[in-house]
Amino acid sequence: MAFILGSGSPRRLELLGQIGVVPDAVRPPDIDEDPLKAEQPRPYCNRITREKLGAVEAEHDDIVLCADTTVAVGRRILGKPADADEAAAFIKLLSGRRHRVITSVGVKRGDKIWQRDVVSTVKMKPVSKPELDAYLATGDWKGKAGGYGIQGPAGALIPWISGSFTGIVGLPLSETAGLLKGAGYPLYAAK
C-alpha cells in the first residue's frame, strides 16, 4: 500500500506534514477544471475532486488523496486568475464583502471513495488602490483560487473568517485525517 497525493500544491503537501503524513508519491492529475454551464460552486468543487481521484494512476490497494478549493461569490465561481488583470478583478469583487471558500477533499482506495466538503466564510476588508497594487506586485495571486491565499500577503486583507482555516488554505486537516483513517491509512501509528 502506497499513499499518493494527487496534487501539485505545495500548501497541501505542507499541511499533510503538519499531521505527520508524507506521501510515497506526488502525482498531480491533469484534468479540465472549467465549470460546466450553470454549475453551482459546491457541486463543481465536489465533481472536480472526484475527477482528480479518477485521473491519478494508482495500484488497487493504494490510498489516493485529492482536493479542490473554490472561492465563490454567490453562485459565481472564482478560479485561478489567468493574469494580473483577472486577479485585480477578483480582489475588487471580494473587497469589502463576505464570500465562501469551499474545499472538497476525497480519498480513494480501490473502488471506494470517501469525500467531504468543507465550506468556510471569509470577509475581505475594503481594499484600497495602493493596497491592491502592492498585493498584485507580490505575485502571490498566481495559482490561487480567487486570486489570493490567506496564508500569504493577502492575510492582511482578511479580518474575519468562520470555518476551517486549513480548509481555506486548501486542505481541511480535521476532515482529511478522518478520511485517511477511514481508508485505513495508519495515521498516528507509532513509527
Image: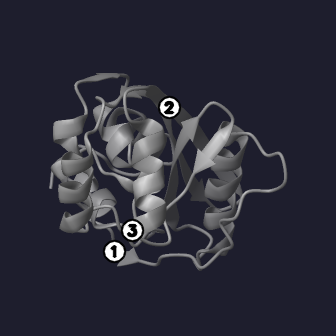
Q: Which mark is residue 24?
A: 1
Query: Residue 19 placed where, x, y %?
Result: 22, 46
Does residue 117 appear to the left or right of 98 in the view shown?
right
Mark 2 or mark 3, which has the lower sequence index? 3
Does residue 147 appear to the left or right of 93 in the view shown?
left
Query: What is the residue that sits farthest to the right in this orientation?
Result: 37
Query: Residue 168 placed where, x, y %?
Result: 37, 40
Amino acid on which disc 1 is placed? Asp
Say above or below: 173 vs 37.
Answer: above
**Residue ID at (39%, 68%):** 84
Mark 1 or mark 3, which has the lower sequence index? 1
**Residue ID at (65%, 66%):** 33
Residue annotated with mark 2: 100
Which is more toward the observer, 176 or 83? 83
Which is more toward the observer, 169 or 3? 169
Query: Residue 172 placed where, x, y %?
Result: 38, 39
**Residue ID at (83%, 46%):** 38
Amino acid on which disc 3 is placed? Ala
Which is more toward the observer, 124 or 36? 124
Residue annotated with mark 3: 84
Does residue 70 appear to the left or right of 153 in the view shown?
right
- Whether residue 19 is visible: no
